[in-house]
Amino acid sequence: MKENRRQATLSGGQHLFDQRMKNYLLIPSLLFLLTGLQIAGTAQGHRPLTKSELAYIHTDRDIYLTGEYLFFKVYVANAENLLPTSQSSIAYLSLYAPSGTPVSAITIKLTSGMGWGSIYLNDTIRSGAYRLRPYTNLMKNQGSLSNFSKEITIINQFDNLTGNLIPSLAIPHADTTVVKQTTAIPVTVTQLMNEYKTGDSAKFEIRLSDLLSDSVCAHLSVNIAHEHSLSDHARSFLSYVQQMKTESLSPGNSSARVNYLPEKFGQLLTGRVINRETKRPVKNCMVLLSCTDSIVNLSGSNTDSCGTFRFRLSDYNITKKCYLSFGNQLHYKELQIIPDQRDFEPETAIPVLPLTDTILSKHIRQAELFMSIHKIYNTQPGIIEQHFTSTATLRPMLYKVPTEVFYPSEYLPLKDFKEIAAELSFQISVLKQRDQYQIECNYPRVDGEERGAAAIFLNGRHLDESSTVLRMGSASIKKIEVMNAPVVCGSQVFNGIVAIFTPDGMNDTTDTRNSLPPLLFHPVSTPARIAEDGENAASLPDFRHLLFWEPEVFIAKEHPATIRFKTSGLRGKYLIHIEGMTSSGQIISYHDEILIK
């Protein structure tokens, strides 16, 4: 019942927040118009006027052990006025190792410029200083300036580096002195005591400042954690915001062409087609997107004058191996497909820890004790996972009923596809032209109509050429489907379809000479969150470093938020971080501290 009431309150607060945000955001019809202008402008080499964005991430802690969850909330705002973005509904979060290698990357759904989730830190991660980087597709137009990142430290207990985790570096330690309110922060915190005992039930209230208008509301994230798990990142963020606003007004930045569009209704897959020799862009070239699947699927995109192609991804593409290929281009071997990077260039993390080695070692030992309790009692008290499944039942198909379906394994073994076509099917032929073989469909043609190669699919994946298939015999083919008629995909017309499916199906690893590595698109993150204490929590030893994490806190003038938490058995100083933004574009960053004796 308590959880249901809490969810009802959050849902109601979100609705009220969204209603009030309509007073500040552009109307949807205008956004459709702007997006269309951006696409048209980029296609003609113009410089469309698109607002840039900035992103900030609030994490529950800054130091983690492998086996723990990293909780986060991402805030994305327009760079000009700091209002929650109305342009992007998709954000990305990448976790980078000290070497700059990406360790984890997830997709986040944004609602009114905010989204939250979690990352499970498995025991394959090595100890070191890591970097979290939130961004949107639109932010990539600004380059590294929009590439705001936050440093965290991850400890793997099996590395045996507790005593000498980070090398001694001549780097000044960060200032972790807590300043309650150095500026006019638009929230006030009441009912918070300075000291608590272990195991106490505590609460405090968050209100909007009386100086704000009655129409203003705010969305917050709140965490309470041991002082050695946190450091103050608010000042670096505020400095970043100032840099972003200053840079956005400079003449050089205003002349930058927008190549990356806001992802308003889903993820975008973009890239370029160039000539391999001249490296110049190629326009009016059909690029095809297919996925490894048990059915034939295909979508197409023509390149613009800059050689750029764009695909709007759907739930069907998520978690599948996606491949880019060409249509029946006469000179496709002279062309090259270059998909855009999903992230910025890697950056080596520079550790700036607010702890000495002695304090850090003590903190790690305490955290290991807490992790050991989890293993002993075989439980993760207070942690639940939310799983979201897509309701979409997308099954893109180029044909509903194939002309012919046959199974080579039901006949005498044949060594290659030429023998299969000659012996088993009157619908297809393998012909040799200019020292190359191609597969054709034998449908009746009108006078003067030229014959041409059919579209070849292997386990749902479109192939640029048929050489891979021609080497396949009866033993490696489970089923062949033939569509013996012309098929249209965008501006591309195929002279029939031949779809081959192997016994291992979705696990097919067959590659072609001119193919790109597969692209894998992740679903929106399925976050874990901290639940209310269960009935058995009181019987377990409690050495939590993280006392509270809530990414969805809504407040308004008539709607304050009450935060309830329980202190753990680990004594010491705990820091309270409240981050967020108001509907009028004000940044909220409130820090306080309590002492547990």
Image (tube, rainbow, N blue to C red):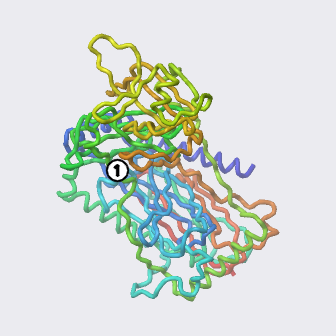
- Amino acid of disc 1: Asp
Of residues 308 and 370, the one drawn nearer to the viewer in this rendering: 308
Where residue 200 sits, quadrant-wise, is bottom right
x 39%, y 42%: residue = 324
Q: How many marks?
A: 1
Q: Is residue 58 above or below residue 570?
A: above
**In the image, is 144 to the left or to the right of 412?**
left
Of residues 189 and 300, the one drawn nearer to the viewer in this rendering: 300
Q: Quadrant of the C terminus?
A: bottom right
x 63%, y 59%: residue = 562
Of residues 434 and 62, the one drawn nearer to the viewer in this rendering: 434
Residue 116, position as x, y percentages in the image: 53, 54
Work out which residue is located at the far top of the displayed protein and give it: 447
Q: Is residue 183 above or below residue 499?
A: below
Residue 274, position as x, y percentages in the image: 25, 46
Q: Is residue 370 above or below residue 211?
A: below
x 41%, y 58%: residue = 55
Residue 436, position as x, y percentages in the image: 32, 35
Q: Is residue 324 visible?
A: yes
Where does label 1 land, which residue? 340
Question: Is label 1 in a helix, a strand or a loop?
Answer: loop
Q: Is residue 36 visible?
A: no
**In the image, is 170 to the left or to the right of 564?**
left
Where residue 375 sits, quadrant-wise, is bottom right
Residue 569, position as x, y percentages in the image: 72, 76
Classify mark 1: residues with Cα within 10 Å, few (<14), some (14-19) or many (20+): few
